[in-house]
Image: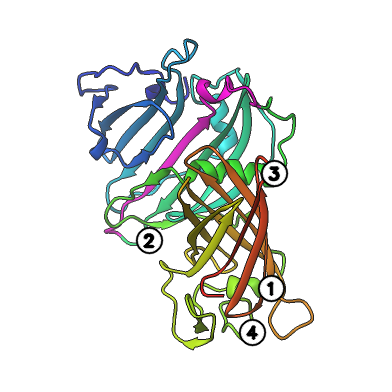
Amino acid sequence: MALGFLGLAGSAMAQGEGGFLNVSATESPVRYHPPFNSGAVYLRQVRSNSTVSVARWLDQSDNAHSSNQIYIESVFSETSPGFAFRTDTPPVKLLGMFDALKNKSRQNGDSFSYQTPSGPIMVLPFARENAQCISFSGRWEPTRADQRGSQLLGYFCEPIAVQTAPAHPTPAQQMDPVAARDFAANFFLRFDINLPNNAGAPVTNGQVPAIAPTNTEANKPSSATSNGVMANNTVPQTTVMTGQPQAATIPADEGIGIATRWNNTDGSGALKFDKPAGEGTMIIDDANRHCEGYWQHEDGRYETPTLPFGNWAVFCTDGTSARGTYTSTDPSHVKGDGQDNTGQPVFFRQAGQ
């Protein structure tokens, strides 16, 4: 067993050499907000220059085959100030390090970098029996002597409750990159990473997201008159309500308001500028669901023959999802069109249009 603590049972063990202690959810550096009945076990071990936290989520649905199956397992290691991790652990190595995956999994996609609020996380799609899964790893290295290093390793597999659903698809032999990103996004929207105080900086190792915008202009911070409203982290001239340009800066945590219509239900939401230039988080709320996802600029600039355009996708509390494209004719007009996973139309317009 490459990581000796991964085979521990969920029950508490006395703190000691090689032993882990049960801790409460509030003491865990990672959290997950499951969409169905689920249990969790949190373990911790304090070592000489590091603290290791293990968290597992178990399927506790009414399905007789679930048997408290572990469908998420994560290991979060935190060093003492000034200590760094020696080597990277790419997500493909995790398939042989976790007991539940060893000799039971097959890679079915290429690894890619997914941008989370805490920094980039490397992700690998894989399949375990009838479950589609991802493994993930991230690292935050100290850049000063008073900072802590941190490392996250883990995996997520569709739980039995999902695998036994009537429309559940068999995992693909090779998962499409867009589908892999959507699968990761649906997981990370429910997965919180709480970095310790004085945590170091994210480590990218030169990795570039596999589905990043190809237009280099989309990665440059600039004014809304040179790039699209959807291609900036800050927007010097735009509006969230009136549809007319205003001299205002939209805070990164607010973004721009949108009015939505999902089939025949009206709702509202926001397109946030909370990720690297050219992408951000997307939220939709209506009477039937709460949805979160992402938007991503693909190409185009204002005052050129090709106006800004991109794609978006959201995943919802009622199990539905939707995806589509958007266009922006000027900094105060953006519209998106798409459909949900049942073929129903979904569209949005900038609020006030």
Residue where numbered disc 1 is placed: 308
Whether 81 is among the magenta residues is no
Q: What amino acid does circle 4 point to?
A: Ser
Work out how far the residue at label 3 is from the one at label 1, CA to CA, in angstroms.
Answer: 26 Å
Q: Is residue 111 visible?
A: no
Work out how far the residue at label 2 is from the one at label 1, CA to CA, in angstroms.
Answer: 37 Å
Residue where numbered disc 4 is placed: 226
Q: Earlier in the sequence, mark 2 or mark 3?
A: 2
Callout 3 secondary element: loop
Whether 156 is among the magenta residues is yes
Work out how far the residue at label 3 is from the one at label 4, CA to CA, in angstroms.
Answer: 36 Å
Q: Position of residue 242 (x, y in %)?
A: 49, 80
Residue where numbered disc 2 is placed: 143
Q: What amino acid does circle 3 point to?
A: Gly
Image point (54%, 45%), residue name: 315
Start-end of magenta stretch: 145-168
Image point (52%, 39%), residue name: 136
Q: Earlier in the sequence, mark 2 or mark 4?
A: 2
Q: Is residue 255 visible?
A: yes
Q: What amino acid does circle 2 point to?
A: Thr
Query: How many marks overall?
Result: 4
